[in-house]
Image (cartoon, rainbow, N blue to C red):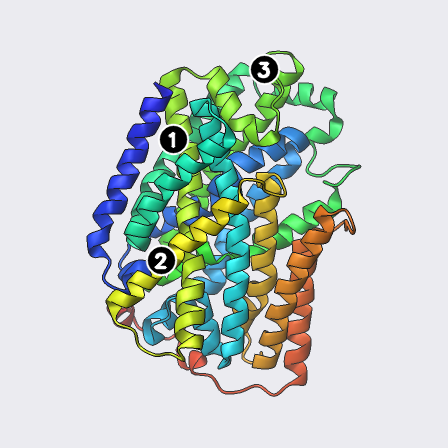
């Protein structure tokens, strides 16, 4: 029954992907869907890609190990959605409309009149996307491994094959529509697990009492000892609330909304729906209590907590629906990352730098985009057979890469006219190099700082950006010719 429901769900997603093929005419439709979507579609796409397989599989595993402290990620990420809409949504949508921007590096080259900024930020997006995609693939393999009762390698191969068909075929139109459907499934699954699991552990008070007996730190916002202390709390604030503005798979969706006036509704819907799906993370708390009282076997890896809990404690029909919700989280973010990764290569490096802006035919652009998407899938698939970390920490590291490389040059740069191209070049390079280097040193055990490596890199990048901008001469820029506040309603409707 679980398998049947899962197959039906995947077939529906595949049909949407294949059906969307006929709407793909050029890079504009492949990457931004022709800027034609309403607030509900954009909002649910933003909340579903913010959650991801990292959220639905990796974070319940971290909650299982660490308790309530991990929920600060969800709280800060919900706040981050509001911050991103407040700072970036309107200017990004208007710049995209006026100048035809399709990607984040498109906008950044325009802002700083610099190909170097385009290249560095495109490489940062590619690096972060590969890391995040590894997290999605590992989550996908863990889920199918449990459902099908097969080894991880075969499960990973099946999941990636299905994902490839509908992402390569459908592009962003497929992604937005499947995100919409998948977020509805994710909300339903989260509520079912939260309510059903709470009954199993005897309510919140009883559960918290048992968790406190296991370790008093399990019920605290941060731990008194160990790695999830006050510095982790501070790190989550920087990476997930401030750093949300640098997540290209999320903020690039601001390009796609039909009208600027719809953004305020999309913001409320996105934050609310994301907050509901965070309820699924209680799976980690439920599983920890049940393992301790002998009702559930201890998982071989924290990444298996969600699939094991669902399979063990829900009837097959409900379990099938919940598994579909988890698969939805994984696939919605996978498609978003594959598209931003391929756009960073085709649009931002090949077409705009190597070919120096040479115009390609729409058919050739689309063909290159699909080929590169397939290449990125192949590379990340190979790396995912032996990933260096748990799903949760892989996803966290990728958020850190994006935050450090993109937040200062994007968010500060669109607000601060004094920012210069020299500051942007050095800042984005410092963010990319430091975030990757510090994470590698941490994984190898060479240097394990109290503050998260991504947060450190973002602070270094922001400080560098401001310092060098103040030392260098600013230039006039077409981006600031747009009147963000004074446009009349009639003009908003036209946009």
Residue 113 at x, y percent in the picture: 48, 82
Q: Return the disc, 2 or 1, that comes first in the chain's sequence.
A: 1
Residue 457 at x, y percent in the picture: 67, 60
Question: At 45% across and 76% down in the image, what residue appears?
Answer: 353
Q: Is residue 163 visible?
A: yes
Question: Which mark is on residue 125?
Answer: none
Q: Is residue 114 above or below residue 221?
A: below
Spatial separation of the CA atoms under disc 1 and disc 3: 22 Å
Q: Return the disc, 2 or 3, that comes first in the chain's sequence.
A: 3
Q: Is residue 253 visible?
A: no
Question: At 54% across and 55% down in the image, what residue appears?
Answer: 128
Kindly report which numbered mark, 2 or 1, lies closer to the viewer in this rendering.
2
Q: Is residue 418 left or right of residue 90?
A: right
Residue highlighted by disc 1? 324
Residue 336 at x, y percent in the picture: 41, 51
Residue highlighted by disc 3? 296
Looking at this view, is 419 or 390 the one in front? Answer: 390
Question: Which mark is on residue 371?
Answer: 2
- Considering every residue shown, the one lying at the far top of the view is 294
Q: Is residue 152 left or right of residue 186?
A: right
Kindly report which numbered mark, 2 or 3, lies closer to the viewer in this rendering.
2
Q: Quadrant of the C terminus?
A: bottom left
Element on which disc 3 rests = loop
Q: Return the disc, 1 or 3, that comes first in the chain's sequence.
A: 3
Residue 423 at x, y percent in the picture: 62, 77
């Amino acid at each position: 029954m679980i398998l049947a429901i899962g197959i039906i769900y995947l077939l529906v997603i595949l049909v949407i992907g294949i059906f969307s093929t006929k709407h793909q005419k050029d890079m504009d439709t492949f990457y931004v869907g022709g800027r034609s979507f309403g607030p509900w579609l954009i909002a649910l796409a933003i909340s579903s890609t913010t959650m991801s397989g990292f959220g639905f599989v990796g974070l319940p595993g971290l909650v299982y190990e660490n308790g309530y402290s991990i929920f600060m990620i969800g709280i800060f990420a919900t706040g981050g959605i509001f911050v991103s809409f407040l700072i970036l949504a309107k200017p990004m949508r208007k710049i995209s409309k006026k100048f035809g921007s399709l990607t984040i590096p498109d906008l950044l080259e325009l802002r700083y009149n610099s190909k170097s900024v385009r290249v560095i930020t495109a490489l940062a997006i590619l690096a972060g996307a590969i890391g995040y995609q590894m997290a999605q693939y590992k989550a996908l393999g863990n889920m199918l491994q449990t459902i099908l009762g097969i080894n991880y390698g075969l499960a990973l191969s099946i999941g990636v094959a299905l994902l490839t068909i509908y992402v390569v075929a459908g592009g962003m139109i497929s992604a937005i529509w499947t995100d919409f459907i998948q977020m509805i499934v994710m909300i339903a699954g989260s509520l079912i697990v939260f309510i059903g699991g709470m009954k199993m552990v005897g309510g919140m008070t009883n559960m918290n009492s048992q968790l406190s007996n296991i370790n008093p730190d399990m019920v605290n916002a941060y731990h008194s000892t160990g790695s999830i202390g006050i510095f982790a709390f501070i790190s989550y604030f920087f990476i997930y609330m401030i750093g949300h503005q640098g997540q290209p798979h999320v903020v690039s969706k601001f390009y796609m909304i039909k009208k600027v006036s719809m953004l305020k509704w999309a913001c409320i819907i996105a934050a609310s729906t994301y907050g509901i799906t965070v309820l699924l993370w209680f799976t980690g708390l439920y599983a920890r209590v049940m393992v301790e009282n002998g009702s559930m076997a201890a998982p071989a890896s924290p990444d298996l907590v969600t699939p094991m809990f669902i399979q063990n404690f829900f009837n097959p029909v409900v379990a099938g629906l919940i598994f579909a919700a988890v698969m939805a989280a994984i696939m919605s973010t996978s498609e978003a990352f594959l598209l931003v990764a391929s756009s960073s290569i085709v649009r931002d490096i090949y077409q705009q730098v190597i070919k120096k802006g040479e115009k390609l035919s729409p058919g050739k652009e689309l063909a290159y985009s699909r080929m590169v998407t397939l290449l990125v899938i192949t590379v990340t698939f190979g790396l995912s057979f032996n990933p260096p970390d748990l799903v949760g920490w892989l996803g966290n590291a990728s958020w850190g890469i994006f935050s450090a490389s993109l937040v200062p040059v994007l968010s500060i740069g669109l607000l601060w006219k004094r920012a210069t191209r020299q500051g942007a070049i050095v800042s984005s390079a410092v963010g990319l190099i430091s975030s990757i280097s510090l994470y590698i040193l941490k994984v190898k055990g060479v240097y394990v700082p109290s503050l998260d490596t991504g947060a450190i890199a973002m602070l270094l990048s922001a400080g560098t950006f401001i310092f060098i901008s103040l030392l260098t001469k600013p230039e006039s820029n077409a981006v600031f010719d747009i009147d963000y506040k004074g446009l009349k309603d009639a003009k908003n409707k036209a946009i």
